[in-house]
Image (cartoon, helix red, strand yellow):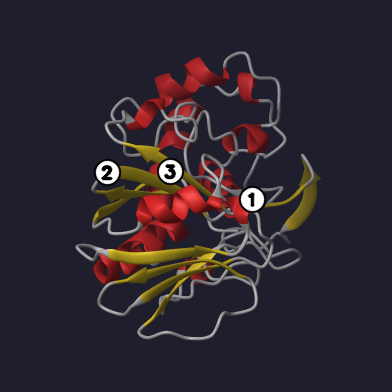
Amino acid sequence: MPELPEVETVRRSLEPFIKGETISHVQVFLPRMIRTHDAETFERGLAQQTIRALSRRGKHLIWDLDDWVMISHLRMEGKFLIAEENVPKMTHEHVRIQLTRGRHVIYHDVRTFGTFDLYQKPVTLKTLPPLKDLGLEPWDDGFSAAYLNAKMHARQAPIKSVLLDQSIILGLGNIYADEVLFCAGIHPRTKAHKISLKRLERLAECVKTILTRAVELGGTTIRTYENTLGIDGLFQNELYVHTLENEPCRICQTPIRRIKIGGRSTYYCKSCQH
């Protein structure tokens, strides 16, 4: 599943192909992916629009057009592909955006969980439904141990589950939550409200460090998610615990364990995390 580093990698690799390009026409093959309009209105609205910029908030891609803002979410296995010329419709292709210079932007999604929202300008991004309840990104002003303490002091859920809550920290998914907790030395079952301010300082530092490094390396390419824009993530080479069940911890040689928390596989070292 793409997390913040993978979505940022998609944004960085996709934007040079589409920025400044004008959309010729759009085809929607799975109308339920379009949440704010019917498919026909969506197709008409995008026609003849120039793509001014492509930004990101959490795991959402934000397309800045002349008259509209489009927000797309890749969900579990969504991908954007670039075709330099017209190609036959692909299996699992659900939206195709044709640009006036001949390029095609194809949205491909085996699981069909991806979404598109279209809003007419002027809009205030933070008030739009897909974005309004989101928390802070690690690089936002205000992201700190004090912020985490304010959000977690009444939370009795395991810290692993709380880290996945996008209303608190944006962009963390299963992979990076495991790695952040290892970095911080915190057991994933620890109740969030029991973590001291000093340990939250370390946690906040690890969130920034892990996600910054993952973005630098293009994210993590694993079986469940592979980028299709020619960028292979390399962060999987730096994983300390995630997917490494029974392998020796790189710090203490204790075998890595796997447990289930909130239905998600969670990997940790029982010696380094407590």
Q: Quadrant of the N terminus?
A: bottom right
| Label located before the other in sequence (2 or 3) | 2
- Whole-number angstrom distance, CA of label 2 to CA of label 3: 10 Å
- Out of 61 and 143, give the one closest to the viewer: 61
- Whole-number angstrom distance, CA of label 2 to CA of label 1: 23 Å
Give residue 32's mark: 1
- The amino acid type found where label 1 is placed reads Arg
| Label located before the other in sequence (2 or 1) | 1
Q: Position of residue 175 (x, y in %)?
A: 59, 55
Q: Which residue is mark 3?
A: 118
**Residue at position x 45%, y 27% from top?**
132
Give residue 67's mark: 2
**Residue at position x 34%, y 43% from top?**
69
Mark yes or no: residue 212 visible.
Answer: no
Judge the density around disc 2: few (<14), some (14-19), many (≥20) Cα neighbours within 10 Å: few
Task: Describe the element under mark 2 as helix, strand or loop.
Answer: loop
- The amino acid type found where label 3 is placed reads Leu
Q: Position of residue 94 (x, y in %)?
A: 58, 65
Give residue 225's mark: none
Mark yes or no: residue 35 visible.
Answer: yes
